Amino acid sequence: MKKILICIMMIFLFFASIGVGYFYLNTRNDQKKESRLEENIEYNNIISTQQQEEMISPNTEITKTIYYEKCGHTITEETEAEDEMINLTEEEFEDKFPEWEINSFDTENISIFKKCDETCPEHYIIGESEGIINIYRLNKDGEEELYETTSIYLSYLPEQDQQRIRDKIEVYGMINLNSILENFD
């Protein structure tokens, strides 16, 4: 009888340990699943509440287009973002630079446009002063300002070119200016 009682206790302990192990493993798996589920919910909540606004970075390329009303020229220039522009959103950029109209805005490229009631800086005049050829630039109001004094003496040029320079030669663009000056050298 003792042997039967011991066997029954052993079988009972065996099944009890299996039951406890099964219960423990299931509750641990359920806890892990719940933990993962909570992590996913928290992660999803974080993502859904965050807004990824486009911001200007130091590598953002800025395309500036300016239309000059006095001369009718349009000049487009591509530059990197200036220090004062970095980390601005589109709305902040509009607030800080109201004179510019935004055509497109993202972290890689921004295209902006504005009109100016000025003359563009690409207008040059070739003239002379004291027998030396000078380059004048038209400022934003259309007035001549000395831009550069060359080392070319007017007296070394043919009479026809001397007269053209005395009458002043108007030139648009640095390429055209350099081309004409090369002919006088």
Image: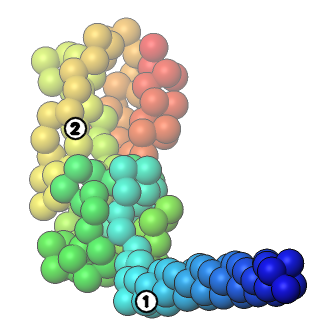
Position of residue 168 relative to residue 120, above or below, is above
Task: Please name whichever residue, 155 or 103, is drawn nearer the observer in this view of the structure.
Answer: 103
Q: Quadrant of residue 113?
A: bottom left
Could you tell me which quadrant the C terminus lies in?
top left
Task: Please name whichever residue, 3 or 154, is drawn nearer the observer in this view of the structure.
Answer: 3
Amino acid identity at mark 1: Asn
Within 10 Å of the Cα at label 2, are there few (<14), some (14-19), or many (20+) other Cα atoms? many
Task: Please name whichever residue, 184 or 7, is drawn nearer the observer in this view of the structure.
Answer: 7
Location of residue 156 in the rendering, given as x and y in whole percent from the top left corner: 37, 9
Point 16% across, 80% down: residue: 95
Location of residue 121 in the rendering, given as x and y in whole percent from the top left corner: 28, 51
Point 42% across, 46% down: residue: 173
Point 75% across, 83% down: residue: 9
Residue furthest to the front in view is: 1
> Mark 1–mark 2 contact, CB under 8 Å?
no
Position of residue 27 relative to residue 183, above or below, is below
Amino acid identity at mark 2: Tyr
Q: Is residue 181 left or right of residue 149?
A: right
Point 35% across, 63% down: residue: 56
* Mark with earlier residue (1, 2): 1
Q: Which residue is mark 1?
A: 45
Q: Is residue 29 visible?
A: no
For mark 1, give the secondary structure. Answer: helix
Q: Which mark is residue 136?
A: 2
For mark 2, give the secondary structure. Answer: strand
Q: Is residue 82 visible?
A: yes
Q: Quadrant of residue 93?
A: bottom left
